Image (tube, grey):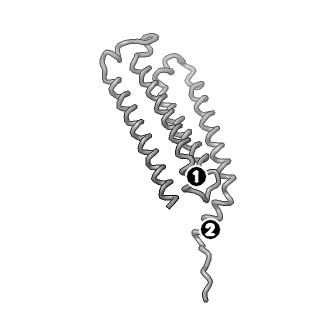
């Protein structure tokens, strides 16, 4: 019964996050459709107001991703109790997904100001992605013995004693 409750909690948090993300993306789409927002420059002709507002919406979406990862971590750890630190692994994977989303979300307002230096932007995201990927990999490596035992128990279940 406890795993059923953990799964329910995880689904509630996932649906809540999807509703927040849908709302944010709908707001971003609406702002992009406004003809007067596309024409108004913010700092210069390089940065229209719509790009700036979409980057703010993107930042809020990243915050929703990270919050979901931290809130759902205990549920994932309870559901995958055979994997040590499953919640932390899940949190790192969600952070990687947030970074991949951020990479594309923030290009429009940043690239016009860093002509010929896009490699700095790309290096920044590569460094953070590798950091969280290595953390997740080390956690999986630390859990490899327990994972191996669990997989072996599935492949070759212990036989029941015959009376």
> Residue farthest to the bottom?
163
Q: Quadrant of the C terminus?
A: bottom right
Give the SS element for disc 1: helix
**Residue 62 image offset from top left, x and y in percent:** 50, 33
**Residue 106 image offset from top left, x and y in percent:** 49, 26
Q: Which mark is residue 122?
A: none
Which sits earlier in the primary sequence, circle 2 or circle 1? 1
Q: Is residue 151 above or below residue 10?
A: below
Residue depicted at x 35% and y 17% = 38
Residue 53 is left or right of residue 126, and the answer is left
Mark 2 sits on what residue?
152
Count of marks, rendered view: 2
Q: Dot 1 surroundings within 10 Å: few (below 14), some, or many (20 or more)?
A: some
**Residue 127 image offset from top left, x and y in percent:** 63, 33
Q: Nearer the viewer, mark 2 or mark 1?
A: 1
Q: Dot 2 surroundings within 10 Å: few (below 14), some, or many (20 or more)?
A: few
Residue depicted at x 61% and y 59% = 82
Q: Nearer the viewer, residue 30 or 129?
A: 30
Q: Nearer the viewer, residue 24 or 106?
A: 24
Give the SS element for disc 2: helix
Q: Is residue 93 above or below residue 59?
A: below
Residue depicted at x 48% and y 58% = 4
Q: Quadrant of residue 96?
A: top right
Q: CA distance from mark 2 to mark 1?
A: 20 Å
Q: Quadrant of residue 25?
A: top left
Residue depicted at x 63% and y 60% = 147
**Residue 46 image offset from top left, x and y in percent:** 44, 14
Mark 1 sits on what residue?
77
Q: Nearer the viewer, residue 88 or 102?
A: 88
């Amino acid at each position: 019964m406890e795993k059923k409750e953990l799964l329910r909690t995880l689904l509630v948090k996932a649906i809540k996050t999807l509703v927040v993300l849908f709302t944010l993306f709908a707001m971003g789409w609406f702002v992009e459709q406004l003809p007067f927002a596309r024409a108004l420059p913010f700092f210069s002709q390089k940065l229209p107001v719509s790009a700036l507002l979409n980057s703010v919406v993107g930042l809020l979406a990243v915050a929703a991703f990270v919050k979901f990862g931290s809130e759902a971590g205990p549920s994932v750890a309870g559901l995958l109790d055979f994997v040590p630190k499953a919640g932390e692994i899940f949190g790192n994977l969600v952070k990687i997904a947030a970074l991949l989303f951020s990479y594309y979300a923030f290009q429009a307002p940043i690239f016009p100001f860093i002509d010929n230096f896009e490699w700095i932007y790309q290096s920044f995201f590569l460094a953070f992605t590798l950091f969280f990927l290595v953390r997740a990999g080390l956690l999986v490596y630390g859990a490899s013995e327990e994972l191996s035992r669990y997989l072996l128990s599935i492949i070759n279940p212990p036989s029941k004693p015959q009376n």
